[in-house]
Amino acid sequence: MLTVEGLRSRYGRIEVLHGLDIEVASGQIVTVVGANGAGKTTLLRCLSGIQPVSAGSIVFRGEALTAVPAFRRVQRGLSQSPEGRQIFTNLTVEENLRLGAYLFADDKVDRDMQDAFAMFPILREKRNLAAGGLSGGQQQMLAIARALMARPSCLLLDEPSMGLAPILVAQIFEVVKSLKSLDVTVLLVEQNAFGALSIADRGYVMETGRITMSGPAAELIADERIRAAYLGV
């Protein structure tokens, strides 16, 4: 579904991605794990079109995306739930969700919203409240639900467990895992290597803008180098 080859990106004169190669197969959960500052968020920003690419290619469902603007990528089926949630705090929960569906003006929008409420029941309870009043975990649920309202075939998730209590982290990862049953392919970027690899089909390890290891997630989670560097064992 998604192929990245030789991807490079820079901030000014400083190159932060140094020729990344990544593949995401349809129907899979693929995770990119690594420490803070490894370049994971920059990677997703390049994929969604809000960070310039200086070299390399991005091909999504057979179409080259490198020169396609961000809003067109959403139309193609690539949607992102950003790091830090970035919800619209002064708008209600329902208004945030409807903004996620800004591409559509059909009857299915309300059905999509009901699906979001079924996935995250607390959002139904708070649908008419300002999103800024939600807890951190509830805001993360809203960010994911808003991204799903764009009806993506591939969802980019940037650090969905960041700053959450362990019980909420487990809940978020269960939701991510359940997306496979909805035919949504997921590219998950996470510092929580154990949690991400536990639900993924395939994994990549990123260090200082480079992919240093890749393979089936089950093999990576069992690798002694990964366990020592990221899992604390």
Image: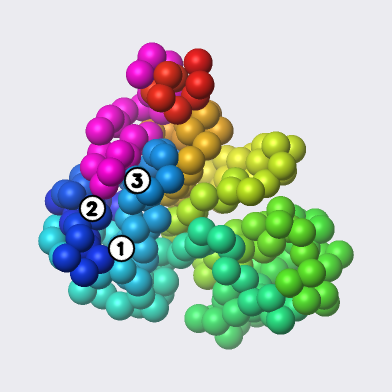
Residue type at mark 3: give it. Ala
Q: Are marks 1 and 3 in contact (CB under 8 Å)?
A: no
Residue depicted at x 73% and y 72%: 132
**Residue at the extreme right:** 125
Residue depicted at x 77% and y 64%: 134
Residue depicted at x 67% and y 46%: 164
Residue type at mark 1: give it. Cys
State whether residue 113 is above or below residue 105.
above
- Magenta highlight on residue 204: yes
SS state under label 1:
helix
Q: Which residue is mark 2?
A: 17
Mark 2, other Cα within 10 Å: few <14 / some 14–19 / many ≥20: many
Q: Based on the displayed image, in which of its 4 quarters is residue 110 positioned?
A: bottom right
Work out whether mark 3 precedes mark 2 in sequence or the reverse, and give the earlier one: 2
Disc 2 to disc 1, how far (Cα)? 10 Å
Disc 1 to disc 3, how far (Cα)? 14 Å
Counting from the top left corner in percent of width and height, residue 143 is at 61, 63
Q: Is residue 86 visible?
A: yes
State whether residue 165 is above or below residue 101.
above
Residue range (magenta): 203-225
Work out whether mark 1 precedes mark 3 in sequence or the reverse, and give the earlier one: 3
Q: Which residue is mark 3?
A: 38
Work out whether mark 2 precedes mark 1 in sequence or the reverse, and give the earlier one: 2
- Magenta highlight on residue 72: no
Q: Are marks 2 and 1 in contact (CB under 8 Å)?
A: yes
SS state under label 2:
strand
Q: Based on the displayed image, in which of its 4 quarters is residue 77 positioned?
A: bottom left
Q: Which residue is mark 1?
A: 46
Counting from the top left corner in percent of width and height, residue 72 is at 35, 77
Residue type at mark 2: give it. Leu
